[in-house]
Image (cartoon, rainbow, N blue to C red):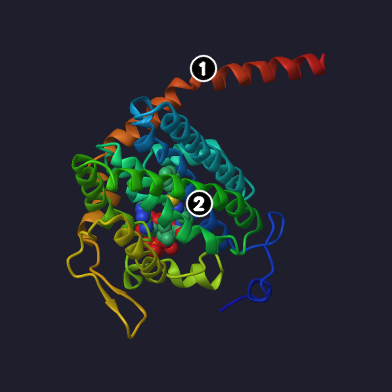
Amino acid sequence: EMSPQERAFQERIDRGEKIEPKDWMPDGYRKTLIRQIGQHAHSEIVGQLPEGNWITRAPTLERKAILLAKVQDEAGHGLYLYCAAETLGVSRDELTMALLEGRMKYSSIFNYPTLTWADMGAVGWLVDGAAIMNQVPLQRTSYGPYARAMVRICKEESFHQRQGFDIMMKMAKGTEAQRKMAQNALDRFWFPALMMFGPSDKDSVHSAQSMAWRIKMNTNDELRQKFVDQTMPQIDYLGLTCPDPDIAWNADKGGYDFSEPDWSEFFDVLRGNGPCNADRMQARRKAWEDGAWVRDGLMAHAAKKSAQMAA
Ligand code: FAQ
């Protein structure tokens, strides 16, 4: 049963009002937002690693500059999202510790390796494409700071997606070796990209409550379907083949029928057993430890300053 306060809160949500940091909110609402925004922030930061891997090996100076800018954008998105989470009363340090201690997640997709330059195309095209599909509706999410962060992030993500598609075009229309690389990247990233939307609706534990609170605007399966419907014509345009042999247009539903990803693989990656989980966590831990002297220096400086002020 809802308390009168909770009922009034739900009515604000139902009217489409934005909830702001100092407003009263149920504990569960705050917790769910911290989990989702924190996880999203961690994904942006960990998400720099697979592409960072190719900055020093980009084929031209121009491609290198573009990739560098893209990866820097992801860092910006992460910081933006940590700030949005901070408005809910959790610090960036606390969120970082939760990640490093395995109490928080980041997107499953970043546990897959980037093996060739074509993977930079596939990541931009498919991974940023899936990210936008999920994030465009989140611009209308009920929590003000999160919704506003999404506006800028979505603008940058759509540039990212285009740069990925542009790489795919070059590769798919290039030499036979390049075309094969593009196909191989699509083959490896297709199902992991579908997993980004989360488990199928019947296994999505948070969807119902998160949608009632407008923390989520769509179910996982709805967005996955939209992504497939948007991406299949692009695969055709590239002259590539979808690795799902059963994918087929269904005129009755006005969308594609397609195979589910291997959910046992998905849950295994979430448990830490994906191809790159250990590497990613090690990179984050190293960055945290290597940055300790900066944090210590800043704290020492702040302490000295405030002592001077007091004197
Ligand atoms: N990976 O009940 P649900 C990017 C977990 S885009 C890992 O359905 P929910 C941009 C879920 O946390 C990627 N874990 O959960 C970029 C829960 O476990 P928990 C980031 C997943 O929250 C591009 C459990 O499964 N985007 O970074 C995943 O209602 C290129 C049950 O699932 C966002 O985070 C997964 N894929 O729905 C950067 C968007 N899916 O926490 C660099 C905001 C589910 O209880 C390069 N987030 N789980 O232990 C969301 O929209 C939602 O959180 C979903 C999951 C849709 C991801």
In the rendered image, the quadrant that contains the C terminus is: top right
Q: Position of residue 163 (x, y in %)?
A: 44, 44
Q: Is residue 152 left or right of residue 132?
A: right
In the rendered image, the quadrant that contains the N terminus is: bottom right
What residue is disc 1 on? Answer: 293
Q: Is residue 238 left or right of residue 245?
A: right
Q: Which mark is residue 56?
A: none
Please count the marks in the image.
2
Disc 2, SS:
helix
The amino acid marked with disc number 1 is Trp
At 49% from the left and 45% from the top, the residue drawn is 41
Distance from Cα at disc 2 to Cα at disc 1: 36 Å
Q: Position of residue 244 (x, y in %)?
A: 20, 63
Q: Is residue 70 left or right of residue 275?
A: right
Above or below, 71 relative to 247: above
Foreground residue among 87 and 229: 229
Foreground residue among 98 and 140: 140
Q: Which mark is residue 158?
A: 2
Q: Is residue 252 left or right of residue 223?
A: left
Quadrant position of residue 227? bottom left
- Marks 2 and 1, the one that precedes in the sequence: 2
Does the beta carbon at disc 1 come under 8 Å from ligand 1? no
Above or below, 35 relative to 76: below
At 42% from the left and 37% from the top, the residue drawn is 48
